[in-house]
Image: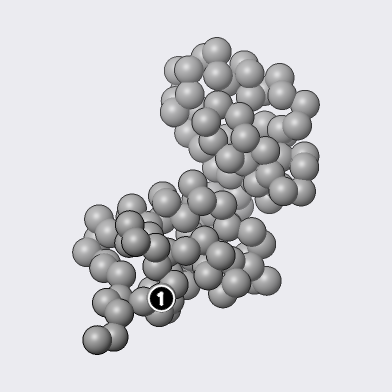
Amino acid sequence: MSAAKLKISSVPANGFWRCGRHFTKTGVLVTASDFTEKQLERLKGEPMLRVAPATKEDAGLAEERAAAIAAGIKTLAAQDFQRDGKPKIDALNELLGDELGKIAVPERNEIWDQLVGGGFKAPEPAA
């Protein structure tokens, strides 16, 4: 299986789920080796998705988007986080939605995991 990067975009404006992943209208960068050959065939054959090799520009835009979401998470107040510690998706979309478009839960989770792995902690509620 290839380690090639792919850009997968949904045809529907609100995104589309396939193979356990949510794909947005603007596109999601994935590594082909994250999927089995059968899953890749299914993704490529899905009429509600567009699958193409990722360009350097796609990779740069994805990094910029992730950095903007991470920066936004760091500005959220304590009440903007769920009981499990993750940022509320509604609060994050309200903060960044006009700038970035809809942020999906899997995208938030991936960035959140990176932040937590780097030592970030959600703010504590005021006593």
**Residue receiving disc 1:** 79
Quarter residue 19 falls in: top right
Picture quarter with the C terminus: bottom left
Percent across and percent down for residue 112 are 37, 57
* Residue drawn at x 66%, y 62% as measured from the top left: 101
* Residue drawn at x 77%, y 42% as measured from the top left: 12
Quarter residue 96 falls in: bottom right
- Camera-side residue of 96 and 78: 78
Local crowd at mark 1 within 10 Å, few (<14), some, or many (≥20)? some
**Does residue 29 lie above or below 43 as drawn?**
below
* Residue drawn at x 52%, y 14% as measured from the top left: 37
User: Is residue 64 among the parts visible in the rendering?
Assistant: no
Percent across and percent down for residue 33 are 44, 25
Q: Amino acid at mark 1?
A: Gln
Picture quarter with the N terminus: top left
Q: Residue furthest left?
A: 119
Q: Residue furthest front?
A: 127
